[in-house]
Amino acid sequence: MHGWFRKILKTGETLSIQREKEEIITPNSVTSVASLSSPSASPLPAEPSGKSPSRPQQLQLALTSEQRWKKKYDLFVCHSSTDSDMEEATRLVLSLEAAPHKLRCYLWHRDACPGAAIATEFAHALKESHVWALLITPSFVQDDWCKYVMHQVLAEGPMSNRMIPLLQNLPHTEYPVELRFYYYIDLSRNPDRGHSSVNKSVLRYLENLAQKELKSHRKLDMSESSSQKDKETLKQCSPATSTLPVTNVEEK
């Protein structure tokens, strides 16, 4: 665990370089998709009835979805404090943060708040992330903080398809028992292909969020339309009120 504190106290140059990279993922920089910030995210446009959006439209809907911007990060990357694991995690994040999708990623050695309690910082970052990636290496299975994050992830969403195990240079016999019923991505042979798979997995999750949001909007529109029709029907069926003339009654 001491390694985490040494890495967090690393000065100057490394952190400044990483902060420059972080500028890629600010909401204001996503101009190619939509100029959004979390509070100002626009509702999804309604699609014509019976017509499914094309693939580019699905990606645009996913990246501009109000549900996406309700969380600060698209992906939380958990890794050990060894230099090799930090370098691999950084390569993964930089590939995901690059154009055209510019996913928002959390790296503890870059994004953690100095002075914050580690457990609190991790719990907050996990809560603010849509998907969680675990870089499982020989160092990962020996790191107490990695085990802590892994169990937090399993408790938060055990069957939610939000966790992505990434296996690298680890014999299958040493693979965590808790994760043996989950599919993983092997980075050992072709890291670039693995990074691409992570990118697709995150986008697929965001697309599912956008589709749920779109269906919710359609149901709301249908409900409002039905309610309006009911009101009109009741108005048409109600008897017209008539005003009876006031007459003088004469005695016969």
Image (cartoon, grey):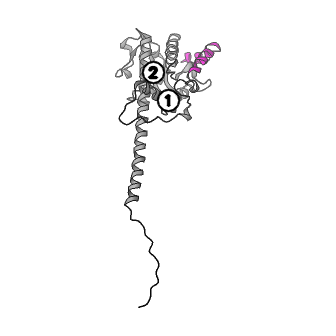
Query: What is the count of numbered marks?
Result: 2
Q: CA distance from mark 2 to mark 1?
A: 22 Å
Residue under pointer 2: 133
In the image, which residues are magenta? 1-24
Residue under pointer 1: 64
Residue at the extreme top of the image, as rendered:
189
**Residue 13 is one of the magenta-drawn residues:** yes
- Quadrant in the picture for the C terminus: bottom left
**Above/below status of 89 relative to 212:** above
Pinpoint residue 158: horizontal percent, then vertical percent: 39, 29
Label 2 with label 1: CB-CB less than 8 Å: no
Pinpoint residue 34: horizontal percent, then vertical percent: 53, 28
Comparing 62 with 132, the one in front is 62
Pinpoint residue 176: horizontal percent, then vertical percent: 39, 19
Mark 2 is surrounded, within 10 Å at the Cα level, by few (under 14), some (14 to 19) or many (20 or more) other residues, namely many
Which image quadrant for residue 54?
top left
**Camera-side mark, 2 or 1:** 1
Q: Residue at x 37, y 37 (%)?
A: 49
Left or right placement of residue 5 versus residue 64 in this view: right
Mark 1 is surrounded, within 10 Å at the Cα level, by few (under 14), some (14 to 19) or many (20 or more) other residues, namely many
Dot 1 falls on a residue whose secondary structure is helix
Q: Residue at x 39, y 53 (%)?
A: 230
Comparing 65 with 110, the one in front is 65
The answer to which of marks 2 and 1 sits earlier in the sequence is 1
- Assign the magenta stretch its main secondary structure: helix
Pinpoint residue 83: horizontal percent, then vertical percent: 53, 11
Q: Name which residue type carries label 2.
A: Ala
Dot 2 falls on a residue whose secondary structure is strand
Which label is found at residue 48? none
Which image quadrant for residue 117?
top right
Left or right placement of residue 126 versus residue 13 in this view: left
Q: Name which residue type carries label 1.
A: Thr
